[in-house]
Image: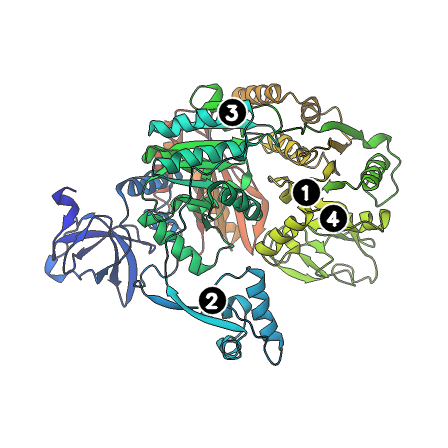
Amino acid sequence: MSGQDFFHQGDRVAVLTAQPLDRLLDYRAPEGGCFRGAFVEVPLGPRKVLGVIWGNGGGDFDSAKLRSVIRVLDVAPMREEMRQFLGKAGDYTLTPMHAMLRLATRAPGLSDPPSMRKILRLGDNPPERMTDARTKVLAVMEEFGGLAFTSRELAEMADVTPSVVKGLVKQGALREEETPRDLPYPHLDPDLPSKDLTQDQAAAAAALAEGVHSGAYGTTLLKGVTGSGKTEVYLEAVAACLRKGRQALVLLPEIALTAEFLKRVEQRFGATPAEWHSGATMTERRRVWRMVGQGNAQLVIGARSALFLPFRDLGLIIVDEEHDGSYKQDEGVLYNARDMAVLRAAMCSAQVVLASATPSLETWANAEAGKYKRVDLTARFGTAVLPQMRAVDMRAEDLAPATWISPTLKQAMRLRMERGEQSLLFLNRRGFAPVTICRACGSQVACDHCDARMVEHRFMKRLMCHQCGETKPVPETCPSCQVEGKMAPVGPGIERLGEEAAALFPQARIAVLSSDLFGSARALKARIEDIAAGEADIILGTQLVAKGHNFPLLTLVGVIDADLGLQGSDLRAGERSFQLMRQVAGRAGRAERAGEALMQTFQPEHPVIRAILSGDEEEFWRAEAEQRRQAGVPPFGRMAGIILSGSDLAQVFDLGNALARNDGPLRQVGAQLFGPAPAPIARVRGRHRVRLLIKADKGVPLQEALARWTAPFNMKGDLRLNIDIDPQNFF
């Protein structure tokens, strides 16, 4: 390490903190000195805050008056490639560096010194007397499968006072242990026997391993039909990475997938890897962060934020189901984890594998252009074959009012039940009914804080706003005309579909998979495992069921409303509908039994429906790409969304109009500005929302122009301006 990277006691150093400041802060290096990248604790006013030594201090403040760094934390320093990654990611997304650092330090207790800690596990003695509070504590312990908690963490998760937890310890219902705060993860053995691969799978695995062995950056699209064994293939790339002594990261789009996936990893490598997602306890997140930085976690399975962990030597990033919309962060720092994975890999000479049966058009186009390599798996594993797909023309079906399962689909479900097989009904609408209307005056129940209709959730016996989460009881009297007894649900949600299925098949075991119906991610995982074991005859699900689940007995998929996503002005509407329908259909026939997918539609002649039924995916992508190319939109052009918000609508529009009048920096690079206009959902949580849209050619330095354009505008009061580079949603 060069001399300039070490700062002696008293040297002026620049510190980046996660506080909302627009600059680095100068301090004096502490006793013993510090290295560039060291995590430190520094004084800021009366507080002590976390920071990182970013380099030489550059301010003109009198050195004698500088405050000193309090201490250097006993954690691995931030590596140069990580600092570069945060900088480039911040430049691309136009995010201040303090916010980027916050992403990279999202673990509790980083400033705590290494020590022993007391943890709690389930004990052997039931309490002498059960109370509601004690029941909640023990339920949390059971739900998390025997994981350890600190006393404080357990009390918070169970929503009880610490004294309840202490009482359970005294009675032996909870067992107290001492353990080091952070232990290395068990060693993963890449040389354990793997599953037998087909010839195509072995060739694909060899191609991915070759990239890993090169030690250089590269991105590969692993495109395989649903059930083709993409996971087994890329786990061989993980094995190659581990043999080289480098770390690997696997990103999953949905936390509910982790339980099944972790079992497969444990079978392949003989131990469980580190997990990083919202379902992990805070204690576990702290351990993951520290062990990753020390190189004591070889493999991390995580959500999108795992990209910002302090890997010591990252050699491989897998983005599973890379097309999934959940990889786009829509609040706070607006980034796409798929794109950031490619950037991070370029910073540390790692390989990226983008795996999907239905890749995003951006990834498909990059592979077509030769920017990414492409590896294809064209057949399902073993004896499984792709499901037969056909449309059910709802214009020809004799359907009773207020029902949604067609006679054709009903007959197919009955046949599966007789065979002891499972059926899946897919409807991408949570709740019981999307609209509650007054049959007297026609008014619809809307959220008090958002411009959105409230959705009835019958299991909660309440209406819920899916924008802000506000709930209220289902009214007996119309809020508008005050007439009683005329409030009626309109349209189907997944819960209403469940009632219809139960009425049609009273003997069937029905399972509804929707995120609203489960109190925790672990409860959802457990239900999915039960279904995979055959403990349901009919499964009803929202888009949650499209994400990689494997139900061996599932042979029929019924899409209740295949037209749902085809309307609207979203440039990705066709692409998303195509991906979702193909992914849902792919849940059927993944084992020995043949599968079938029936799509209920009023538009069987629609180009997207025809493309889904024909199975000619490449033709669909070529046609979609040509439309985008002619329109000059991503991936053949650039776009940015500007979201203005505030409590005063006039002020928000005044800001939007001022931006539109002063668009010189955008015109200088040939960019077009559209708006301002009310956002499709014009009010969320009481804040009015106005949007502007910028469109530019592919090679335009758009971020630089946006920065110059917005710089003169100071946000006063509660006005907010957010810039979304490469927007995925336009709500």
* 223 versus 30 height, above or below: above
State whether residue 28 appears in this view: yes
Dot 4 and dot 1 residues touching (CB under 8 Å): no
Of mark 2 and mark 3, the one earlier in the sequence is 2
**Where is mark 4, residue-wise?**
536
Rounded to the nearest angstrom, the CA distance separating label 2 from label 3 is: 44 Å
**Where is mark 1, residue-wise?**
428
Number of other residues with Cα within 10 Å of mark 4, as a class: few under 14, some 14 to 19, many 20 or more:
many
User: Who's the residue at 14% across and 41% down the image?
Assistant: 2
Left or right: 440 in relation to 515 = right
Q: Where's the C terminus, which quadrant?
A: top right
Of mark 3 and mark 1, the one earlier in the sequence is 3
Dot 4 and dot 2 residues touching (CB under 8 Å): no
Instruction: Look at the numbered disc 2 and give the secondary structure of its residue.
Output: helix
Type of the residue with mark 4: Ala
Measured from the top left, where is residue 217 in percent x and y? 35, 29
Number of other residues with Cα within 10 Å of mark 2, as a class: few under 14, some 14 to 19, many 20 or more:
some
Rounded to the nearest angstrom, the CA distance separating label 2 from label 1 is: 35 Å
Left or right: 64 in relation to 638 = left
Measured from the top left, where is residue 273 in percent x and y? 45, 47
